[in-house]
Amino acid sequence: MNKIPKAPTGTFDILPEDIPTWLRVEETVRKVCGLFGYSEIRTPMFEYTSLFARSIGEVTDIVEKEMYTITRTGADGEGDEETLTLRPEVTASIVRAVIEHDLFARRPLQKLFYYGPIFRRERPQKGRFRQFHQMGVEALGSYDPLLDTEMIRLADVFLRELGIANCELLLNSMGCPECRKAYRAALLAAAQQKRDELCDNCKSRIDRNVFRVLDCKIAKCVAVSDGFPPISEFLCPGCRDHFDQVKSGLEKLGVVFKLQSRLVRGFDYYTRTVFEFSCSDLGAQSAVCGGGRYDNLIEELGGPKAGSVGFAIGLERAIMVMKTAADPAETGAGAPSSATVCPGPAAPCALPVASVFLVTLGQNAKRAGFDLLDRIRGAGIAADMDHESKSLKAQMRLANKLAVPHVLIMGDNELAAGTVNLRDMKASSETTVPQDKIISALQAVLYAGSAR
RNA sequence: GUGGGCGUAGCUCAAUUGGUUAGAGCGCCAGGCUGUGGCCCUGGAGGUUUGCGGGUUCGAGCCCCGUCGCUCACCCCA
């Protein structure tokens, strides 16, 4: 029992029954991003470790203890050592690629999106995995606040397209490094004054990263930090103006948001706008989407001075919200029990795997039928058959389970007559057609305009 | 890394105060219909015998210890 292999902790298999959901999500990613003028980019699953250390920040949890890093020594020459890390996020890779290929030379504004797996060595829990999937969008090369607005709107539209409407958009501005410096000092002073009233955790946060005190969930800490000065009072005129434009842009689009001066994000590279879409029914990991502006990252990684905004959405979390949102509707509709595995509202379940299923009786018919099957497939018609030489009844049951609309039946009688029986499963009607006419007969019934 | 909960057939779960061959539903397979699916009826397979190891006991799925795994939470994040 302990010998059977298992997927590593924090990972999971996406089984065939779940594929329709994922396909729908992937289609939505490409559709919505395309709608907003973003192009897909694909970067490696791993990068040189230094890239993440430089971008995310050396002292963040992710870099300190959550990265899957592999070190290889001397493979390509004497003393040549390279340490590689499975990507714990992809913004750094995007920025790296843009700089490396000088994409700004082609167009000063790069509008890019990505989709794929992310790796973080965290303790798994609800909505948190060691390999999970993100879709993300980045607009690199501009400081325009309208792009911040567009970014948030894109995330909003994407979530809505998936049927997710019960999320709250939290918005804040962290200012530029200058305003943050002033704010940090003020916050530090305030926190140290109230040190005794904070939880032990927050006490240590004061020294490690004061901003984190702001998102402690413990009630008494929240009460205390409510009295702290908000960042908005420390924004410089430039940052204040930028934030005002982002907010008014959202208002004009009718995107409702909630200002949350305690919203602080985990990556060091964020400046000015930060935002998060939060869903209460996700458990403790309530953030489905997180993002913001990073005006200094490109330059820090050796590129030109150029502002950027972006966000990422955790797809497993998005799917979790989709499913909880879909549940009450389904019970109300009185769907058949098999539909409980069907996740999204528009996600098809029990997809037919073939248009035609061939049932044969006896070895001769099986061999002849296999040749016929190959011709049908050659005509571009999805077709399948049984291989266990089961009874006719069993083969029919299988065809029914596979939700195949048409069945071909071939036994010794048909073989001798050079015909095959074509059965319409839905109508329970059957016709006899010559074997050499079977392709056109199938095309006639399949493309007759009947509901697929 | 820390803490709580849980680990019984493929899946979802039962099993009186520890008691003798560990059950059900769904699913799977077959038969009822000797060449025809869905519904129904009948039967069958399936647990290396309850994650693994040890202990207490006349006796452990149930109690104790350890271990592994899952899960939820902290930290942090999508």
Image: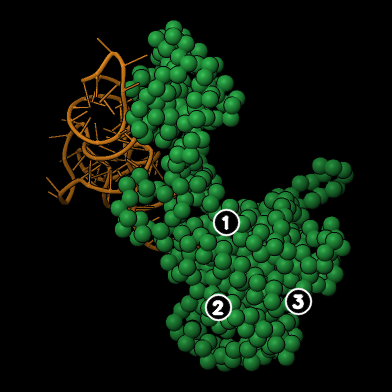
Chain colours: A green, B orange
The Cα–Cα distance between marks 3 and 1, rounded to whole angstroms, is 27 Å
Q: What residue type is labelled 3?
A: Tyr
Q: At x 65% / y 72%, what residue is drawn? A: A150
Question: Dividing the picture into quarters, in which one does residue A305 lie?
Answer: bottom right
Looking at this view, is A188 or A251 the one in front?
Answer: A251
Q: Quick one: label 2, few (<14), some, or many (20+) residues within 10 Å?
A: few
Chain for disc number 2: A
**Which mark lies nearer to you, 3 or 1?**
1
Which quadrant holds the N terminus of chain A?
A: top left
Mark 1 lies on residue: A28
Q: At x 65% / y 86%, what residue is drawn? A: A244
Mark 3 lies on residue: A143
Residue A310, compared with residue A223, is above or below; it is above
**Which mark lies nearer to you, 3 or 2?**
2
Q: Which amino acid does label 1 sit on?
A: Thr
Instruction: Answer with mark 3 or mark 1, whichever residue precedes in sequence.
Output: 1
Q: Judge from the rendering whether residue A396 lies leftward or rightward of residue A212; answer left or right.
A: left
Mark 2 lies on residue: A254
Residue A8, compared with residue A245, is above or below; it is above
Secondary structure category for the residue under label 3: loop
Q: Would you say residue A285 is visible in this rendering?
A: no
Question: Dividing the picture into quarters, in which one does residue A274 lie?
Answer: bottom right
Mark 2 and mark 1 in contact (Cβ < 8 Å)? no
| Residue A29 picture location, percent across and down | 60, 57
Instruction: Answer with mark 1 or mark 2, whichever residue precedes in sequence.
Output: 1
Mark 2 and mark 3 in contact (Cβ < 8 Å)? no
Residue A33, compared with residue A239, is above or below; it is above
Residue A141, compared with residue A13, is above or below; it is below
The Cα–Cα distance between marks 1 and 2, rounded to whole angstroms, is 22 Å
Q: Would you say residue A199 is visible in this rendering?
A: yes
Looking at this view, is A315 or A360 the one in front?
Answer: A360
| Residue A128 picture location, percent across and down | 52, 59
